[in-house]
Image (tube, rainbow, N blue to C red):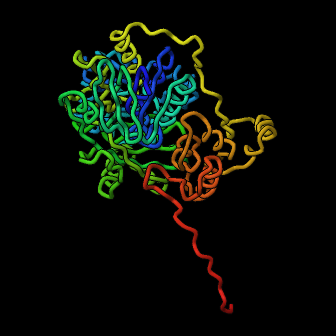
Amino acid sequence: MKYDIVIIGAGISGTAIANALARYERSVLVIEKSNDVSNGASKANSGIVHAGYDAEPGTMMAKFNISGKSLYPELCTRLDVPYRKTGSLLLAFSDKEMQTLEELKKRGDINGVQGLQILDAPDVLDREAHINPDVKAALYAPDAGIVSPYELCIALMENAMDNGVSLWLESPVKNIRRSRRNYLIETSGKSVESSCIINCAGVYADTVHNMLLPQMFTIRPRRGEYFLLDKYAAGQVGHILFQCPSAQGKGILVAPTVHANVIVGPNAEEISDPDATETSARGLKEVWETALKSIPDLPYNQVITTFSGVRAEPSSGDFIIRDYPEMPGYIDVAGIKSPGLTAAPAIAGHVVEMLETQTGKMQQRSAFRERRRELPHFHQLSHEARRELVKKDPRFGRIICRCESVTEGEIVDAIHRNAGAKTLDGVKRRTRCGGGRCQGGFCGPRIIEILSRELDIPREKVRKDNAGSGILFETAAEEVYHGTV
């Protein structure tokens, strides 16, 4: 089996590059070790489209942040992904932090960020009534926004597959060998030959690189823990609220989400295991107590779930996007930490240019499908449109998730699309089913039944997420009570 281009990793970088390459007459394969796209850091981050003032001028992070954010309105409209420009406020609570605002504004001006302003305390409190009244000032960035990171990743991959890109899931790369002009990539189950490889393996990007080249960089896993609050807390915040950054990252934020929740986090903890996505009492305590500095009355009783993500911290301190003369056709896209989500569409365009420099101008497809097949957002439809949809397919008349008003028809549609859902969490990421206040307590068993039926697998084979996350294990023995009441 041979492809022109193989992309290793189906996170936001890999799927954005796959989507960009789908416009050209090249055979493209995406290889992912997990059982779904967007199953690493791309599903477990803050979902922020950054304005671009904190990246060091002259870095790739600064360059691709600015160019990437400008692509978001058109990209998210084309792929039917929720995106909203909210603006952000970087809060200062001391004279030293006010100096940080001044420095970051100057940096943002150099980077080309438009509309930056330093607001005094009354202006800040006028914009956000729940902010700590001890605030002294804030750096306002009107261009910052919010997006659903996993929905964008899924949409990019789905649209790429609609245009001929292939996807292998549950295929961790075991070895790569150079074979004459091509590369032989061995996964846990099968092998593929390709003339070009793009390494987007996230926290494993250094491992993939070292299969072909001497070690030139390392990736350190850095875990961040989060709280997600119910929609009843939505009135607490309208902008993205940052605290002044540290060497460990951009600090604890409090922000709205595109689905009207509130997200709080992350902290930053260096860990040794790239797959250690558990949360801890200590880490969550740190996040919450730090967040209270921004909003003292943040309602803890509205927390509906906690989670963590592991981001790829490069030894270079900057994105690593480069090729190598001794390995023609091989490109590293590594260390894509924050603002990697913002930068991804621009990085994808840059990688296409790099490939064309190496292999020659690529011919564009004559019939590229710009848009995804329309998503049936039942709860957003008018009553008349709902009635018409139910007439066509009665499954849209059966509500499965009460919290988010998701129908059986939407779940079935999400399962059978390209890059479709195969697990409980896969359904949740695509439809919001199980994403509300009860976190799947009511709808979970019904989703298992639907997945079992639609995928034609026993209910015991339905997983919450990756291998080892089984839900049902055996049928409980029926017990009959023979006593008297």
Q: Which corner quadrant of the image does residue 177 belong to?
A: top left
Residue, far top: 361
Foreground pick, 165 / 277: 165
Left or right, 368 with respect to 236, comes to right
**Would residue 84 be seen by someone viewing this image from the given angle?**
no
Vertical placement of residue 427 versus 214, above or below: below
Q: Which corner quadrant of the image does residue 354 belong to?
A: top left
User: Residue at image x 24%, y 39%?
Assistant: 220
Vertical placement of residue 27 versus 311, above or below: above
Foreground pick, 436 / 271: 271
Whole-percent x, y for residue 180 in the image = 29, 19
Q: Which corner quadrant of the image does residue 448 belong to?
A: bottom right
Whole-percent x, y for residue 449 in the image = 63, 55
User: Residue at image x 63%, y 44%?
Assistant: 411
Whole-percent x, y for residue 345 in the image = 43, 22
User: Residue at image x 46%, y 19%?
Assistant: 21
Whole-percent x, y for residue 357 in the image = 34, 9
Vertical placement of residue 287 versus 12, above or below: below
What quarter of the picture does the N terminus occupy?
A: top left
Residue, far bottom: 484
**Would residue 19 be seen by someone viewing this image from the given angle?**
yes
